[in-house]
Amino acid sequence: MQRRQRRWKFSILFLAIFFSLPIIAAKIPLWAEEKPVIETSKQDTKIAYAANKTIATKVSEQKPTTSFKTLIYFTHSHEAYYPMLRKRQQAITVNNDTTNVQTLGDIFVNHFKQNNIAADILNVDTMKVMKQQQMAFYQAYDAVRPYVKKQIEKESYDLIMDIHRDSAGRKTTTTTYKGMTYARMAFVIGGKNQQYQANEAYAEQLSKKLNSLVPGISRGVIRKSGAGVNGIYNQDLSKQVILIELGGIDNNEEELNRSIAILARAIEEAFVEPTSS
């Protein structure tokens, strides 16, 4: 009899718990639906930052452009910057075979890429070639010429830049804008080149655009001819070849990096046409 009563009580208790579960579940937050995460849209404007992240070079807000292709090479490949040598605890010399203007190649490529510009670096160490062939320093343009000629016959480029380091001191090659220092640039055009007006037009347009972005960053276009100078600088190979003196012996990596970022933006704004929508 007692056993039958216990079974009856247990049945009643089980039924009570069973029918009350939906009510309990509705009040417990563990069964609540998880709210969807809504992501806010990111800023559409692209920004290419210089080394210290405090200066930004704004890139066109329009859609990606058609491929604007550039070739970069270094006739005087071992031209060195004193601050870069000091930073690496190397001897302070005008030329260095490991730390020099050519080691800036990757910086050019990265900044150009962020500004919708393709950049090829000519894979030749001109000074090394000259040493192997026992050529004098003044023959540097002759030494690099066949390599440049072969490359531009193989590929088509919209702009070709021969990058150098000026021998002038800091006062001449440095400018300050909004509290930031920049390595100034100068454009050299060979007046002995029969088509120099075309090369000069590219240099003038780029110089003007640079100064509109950072006043004084370009030292202008210098035409060279006459005795004692090359006067052509391989610019007869293409109307798109220009020679750029990037900073001088006293400019540091941060200043060079900022200026390369501005150069990339200037090329993008001066020459690169956006694709149609």
Image: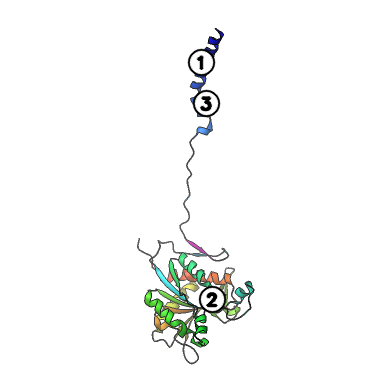
Count residues near mark 3 (Cα–Cα under 10 Å), then give few for <14, some for 14-19, many for 20+. few
Foreground mark, 2 or 3, reads: 2
Count residues near mark 2 (Cα–Cα under 10 Å), then give few for <14, some for 14-19, many for 20+. many
Q: Which residue in the structure is indicated by mark 2?
A: 101
User: What residue sits 37% from the left and 75% below the top?
Assistant: 154
214 above or below 233?
above
Residue 149 is at least partly visible in this image? yes
**Which of the numbered marks, if any, corresponds to residue 24?**
3
User: What residue sits 47% from the left and 61% below the top?
Assistant: 46
Which image quadrant is residue 115 in?
A: bottom left
- The foreground one among 191 and 29 is 29
The residue tagged with tag 1: helix, strand or loop?
Answer: helix
Q: Which residue in the structure is indicated by mark 1?
A: 11
Residue 214 is at least partly visible in this image? no
Foreground mark, 3 or 1, reads: 1
The spot of residue 174 in percent (x, y) is 57, 76
Foreground mark, 2 or 1, reads: 1
The spot of residue 15 in percent (x, y) is 49, 18
In three-dimensional space, the C-alpha distance between marks 2 and 1, rounded to whole angstroms, equals: 90 Å
In three-dimensional space, the C-alpha distance between marks 3 and 1, rounded to whole angstroms, equals: 20 Å
Classify the position of the C terminus by image quarter.
Answer: bottom left
Magenta-tinted stretch: 46-50
The residue tagged with tag 2: helix, strand or loop?
Answer: helix
